[in-house]
Image (cartoon, helix red, strand yellow):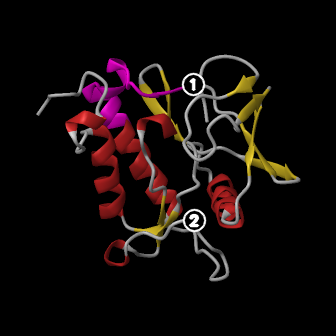
Amino acid sequence: MASAGSDGPLHGGTANRGRVVRLGSTVHRPRGPYSAAVHALLRHLEGSGFTGAPRLIGSYDETEVLGYIEGTAAHDPVPDWAVTDDALRSVAALLSEYHRYARTFVPQHELSWQRPVPLRWRGSLVTHNDPNPANVVFRDGRAVALIDFDLAAPGSVAWELAVAACFWAPLRDERDVSDSRQGRE
């Protein structure tokens, strides 16, 4: 996770709310039963040259340590700067670049993912599956990294784009939108 500030708990999160902490250039967060799969994906992305994801540094006890990514994540209510046309184009470009690098990742069969993508949308591409504004790091109004890969799993570009549209368009019940996008068509 990324947010402005210094050491201490980071904003955002649902399952890990309040349990993700920045310590200098690292982020310490709980590991889960799916962490081996996420770690394999993050190592692949780093080895392939993708710079838009956190680096896996290591783990201890039930904690994983990732590299901190400088920038700002767009937490609710999503700020206006994060939903400009230029910002949205940069989110699309970041997802496209992620898919290009993830396409060469071949997950081992023994890896388990936290939540499978619905069967009809599953494929060989390991998608992020949670590209909501709080999981996208921005610098100067431009999306530069995805964070929180907990929901990553084999999916498809179509699935990822549908999930992204739900968060960014937003294609949700208007009562669930608490920012300037409420009431916009």
Where is residue 172? Give x, y as percent. Answer: 25, 44
Q: Is residue 139 above or below residue 30?
A: above
Q: Nearer the viewer, residue 49 or 21?
A: 21
> What's the residue at 72%, 66% (across, down)?
36
For badge 1, the amino acid type reads Gly
Comes first in the chain, label 1 or label 2: 1
Q: Residues within 10 Å of mark 2 (few under 14, many from 20)?
A: some
Q: Is residue 26 above or below residue 166?
A: above
Where disc 1 sits, the SS reads: loop
Residue 163 shown left or right of residue 74 in the figure: left
Where is residue 126? Give x, y as percent. Answer: 50, 66
Where is residue 179? Give x, y as percent. Answer: 30, 23
Q: What residue is shown with label 2?
A: 114
Residue 18 shown left or right of residue 158 in the figure: right
Q: Residue 160 sits in which quadrant?
A: bottom left
Q: Nearer the viewer, residue 141 or 121?
A: 121
> What's the residue at 71%, 38% (across, down)?
19
In the current view of this chain or complex, which residue is farthest to the bottom?
Answer: 109
Q: Residue 94 sits in which quadrant?
A: top left
Q: What residue is shown with label 1?
A: 71
> What's the residue at 67%, 52% (across, down)?
46
Q: Nearer the viewer, residue 173 or 92?
A: 173
- Give the extent of the magenta segment: 72-90
Frontmost of labels 1 and 2 is: 2
For badge 2, the amino acid type reads Gln
In the current view of this chain or complex, which residue is farthest to the front?
Answer: 175
